[in-house]
Image: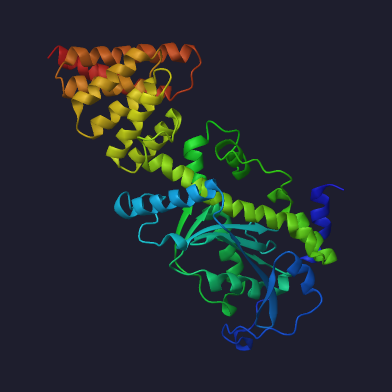
Amino acid sequence: MSMKAKLLRMKHHLQLPEEKDQGELKGGIENEAPEPTDDETAFRALGFEPFYFENERAFRKRVIYPYESAQDKQLVEDMKHIHAFWQDDLQDHPLSFAGKPLDRLLFFDTETTGLSTGAGNVIFLIGYARLMANGVEVTQHLLESPASEAAFLSGFLDDFHEEDYLVSYNGKSFDWPQVKSRHAFIRKQLPKLPAFGHIDLLHSARRLWKDELPSCRLAIVEEHKLSLKREGDVPGSLAPLLYFEYLSNKTPHHLSGIIAHNDQDVRSLISLYALIAKKIIYPLEDTASAKEHVAIGAWFEKLKKFDWAERHFKQAIKRAQQPLPTVYYQLGSLYKKMKKPDLAVKYLDQALMEGTFPPIETWIERAKLAEHFEKDIDKAYSFAQQGLSTLKKREKLGHKANFISYKKDLNIRMKRLEKKRHA
């Protein structure tokens, strides 16, 4: 039977609890745990202990991974240096957690019964990792059944506060909206969700590697960038099937693979965060490739951190094994924004000399500088003319570009410059 067929067959096991009337609630007071039952043994074999709330039961697991290997010790040292850096510089960068203690970073992931945030899908496993003094602490909350969702989310919210800073992978678009959706169904039983900072590493990974990797799925990024290949891993895509099977036969062991997968996900996020942050904040060290420097430079330019963009673009040129006309153009354009026209002219000219087909914008920007900085109308006209000629050649070769917009710009520019030449 196909996975899709199994999911459809087993989804009837997922019966969601109705929202309780507020008058029936006790205001978030955790119940005393009853005497252990035989069915807890299987959960304890997976490392989980029962957690009781409002006569509901969920399960929670905590594991400490000590800093034993040289790699582990280097990772925690790197994170300490990164933490110290954010306190002094680039405090408003999207990856910064300035003002937060290192142990308040919460590397977060969920496993769910579906890929939408609709009422028919629930979160059944929440995992997160923290960097503690004695090792990486991984906490996981497991939903025993949909009827105990309040206990499940209460256990998580006991651990999660406004002082925390989430680090996720696609968490802004998927994981946290799922939490908000499920919380909304039983919000009368639970405290409000705290306000918090949130770093989504998927956006950073896409900026750096979307043109390099076959995909930016976490497992692909792990393999290519962290040299971590998972052996015998249960893919997250099987999570719904495994949970429905567990609900059908009440055998927690069926969830062991997805629990291990989630555990690895949250720990990998620490290494991935450190890797990306080092590439960003240490441009002069041998941490990033030429292409990565280009992507980071463009990111800083978008953030209007021009000094940092300059450092990365220069490192891209230094590390490149062949001329990079596009980077010369980006650096020249950056210097124009920085009000450094001499340097802008230098690098735009370099782009025109090094590239067979430099970006069309190079000709346009060079024409602007010739007209307004060098005050040379003939030179400005020549650059616009060459740009139009290059555009026509590229069009014949089938290159994809915004030809209509560029043609309009260059034709208008040439007509205006022609009038100036004969004024």
**Does residue 35 appear left or right of residue 60 in this picture?**
right
Rendered residue at 46%/57% (across/down): 198
Quadrant in the picture for residue 7: bottom right
Q: Position of residue 169 (x, y in %)?
A: 55, 50
Drawn side of residue 155 relative to residue 361, left or right = right
Placement of the C terminus among the 4 image quadrants: top left
Q: Determine the image quadrant of residue 220.
A: top right
Q: Nearer the viewer, residue 231 or 205?
A: 231
Residue displayed at 47% across by 37% down: 208
Task: Look at the image and name its color scheme.
Answer: rainbow
Total number of numbered labels? 0
Q: Between residue 269 and residue 66, name the one nearer to us.
A: 66
> Which residue sits furthest right?
1
Left or right: residue 134 compared with residue 249: left
In depth, the one of 32 and 114 nearer the eye is 32
Q: What percent of the width, then of the height, locates residue 391?
A: 39, 15
Residue at the far left: name it. 423
Q: Residue at x 53, y 35 (%)?
A: 210
Give how far across and how far down residue 348 sits, in percent.
Answer: 29, 21
Q: In this rendering, does residue 330 appear at all?
A: yes
Question: Would residue 412 be seen by someone viewing this image from the given angle?
Answer: no
State left or right for residue 258 relative to residue 39: left
Q: Position of residue 386 (x, y in %)?
A: 32, 12
User: What residue sits 77% from the left and 55% below the top?
Assistant: 241
Which of 335/184 is in front?
A: 335
Compared with 420, 63 (above or below) is: below
Q: Is residue 250 above or below residue 289?
A: below
